[in-house]
Amino acid sequence: MDQAPSRFPLQAAEKILKAGRSLGLVMGMIQLEMEFEARLDPQRLRRSLDLLLIQHPILACRLDAQAGKSFWQWSETKEPLLLLTQSPEAFDQFRISLADPAQGPQLSACLWQRPSGASLLLKVTHEVSDAGGVKEIGMDFAGLYTRLEKEPDYTPAPNLQGSRSGWQVLQYLPRHKWPGIIFDFLKDLWANFVPRDSVTLPLPLDPGSPVTYVIRHLPAERVSSLAGYGRSRNATLNDMVISAFYRALAKQGKGDKTAALRLQTTVDLRRYMPEERAEEICNLSAMAYPFLGKELGKDFEQTLERVAAIIRFDRGRGMN
């Protein structure tokens, strides 16, 4: 088996996220919460997490900075990766705990064995992976857990050849599309600054206040009804959430008559990759700006019509 290197360079997105964390603009963690009807085997979960660090060596690293240069440095795991709890309060506390990329490794998990099943929460630092990458980690985690049941001595080979750079996407984009993509980027950049002011939401909380999550579970029939409403209008659930956000922003936000309605979101670039997976765990998302400007629409349907049209246009960039 090839020996994994002890040091990996930081990619461009990781440098941006590192700077954002230092400025207090990025919380820096992505989480995947899973619920199971049956209890899980803690020992097999621990072994699966250990094997994840072998399969994806970048996850075993800590973010190191020396003489003004930053890099990923392999670090031996000292603390257990899996926290066991029988308490929902402890599970909630793990959920709001922050992850420090300078400590390493870049992932941890918490298992709550409920009387009728189990809840498992996987936490990954944003510097090493975006949400799309965490989904990949979750799939590999599940694959290892399942395989170890029949092959308890299995050890995966480390992924040492996969690119972690955003440039890996460009090889799958037709070159004649590149000028259009650059032009669209410049238009988005212009829309970020003209008009100068944006409608903003008031944030009364102290920035130093502890964070928490407000979780709401929607019944399946309600989600199905919402999805049907969207389909009848050539819109997705995501389009509807953005539309609802914009209408709430217009109602509760602050800004003068010249302020624009702006929203920044992300697009997973894995959609352009074979099997929609990156070559290795990384940040492989781009920013999207479905701006409404000053044209909200008189009601929700008009807002949804505008948002859906913008999102469809953005979705059509690149490969189409």
Image: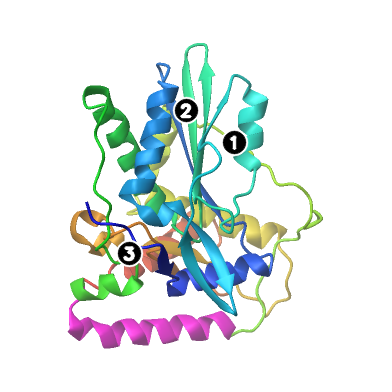
Residue 228 location, x and y as percent?
35, 40
Q: Which residue is mark 3?
A: 269
What's the distance in space between the residues labelled 3 and 1, CA to CA? 28 Å
Circle 1 packing at 10 Å, graded few (<14), some (14-19), many (20+), is few
| Amino acid type for the residue under numbered disc 3 | Leu
Answer yes or no: do the residues labelled 3 and 2 have beta carbons within 8 Å? Answer: no
Callout in the foreground (3, 1): 3
What's the distance in space between the residues labelled 3 and 2, CA to CA? 30 Å
Q: Is 26 covered by the magenta stretch?
A: no
Circle 3 packing at 10 Å, graded few (<14), some (14-19), many (20+), is some
Which dot marks residue 275?
Answer: none
The boundaries of the magenta stretch are: 173-193
| Amino acid type for the residue under numbered disc 2 | Pro
Q: Is residue 230 left or right of residue 212?
A: left
User: Does dot 2 land on a helix, a strand or a loop?
Assistant: loop
164 w.r.t. 242: above or below:
below
Q: Is 186 covered by the magenta stretch?
A: yes
105 w.r.t. 273: above or below:
above
Which residue is at a point 22% across and 27% down the rendered structure image? 151
Q: Which residue is mark 2?
A: 219
Callout in the foreground (3, 2): 3
Q: Is residue 302 left or right of residue 159?
A: right
User: Does dot 3 land on a helix, a strand or a loop?
Assistant: helix
**Which of the pair 208/303 is nearer the observer?**
208
Q: Which residue is mark 1?
A: 215
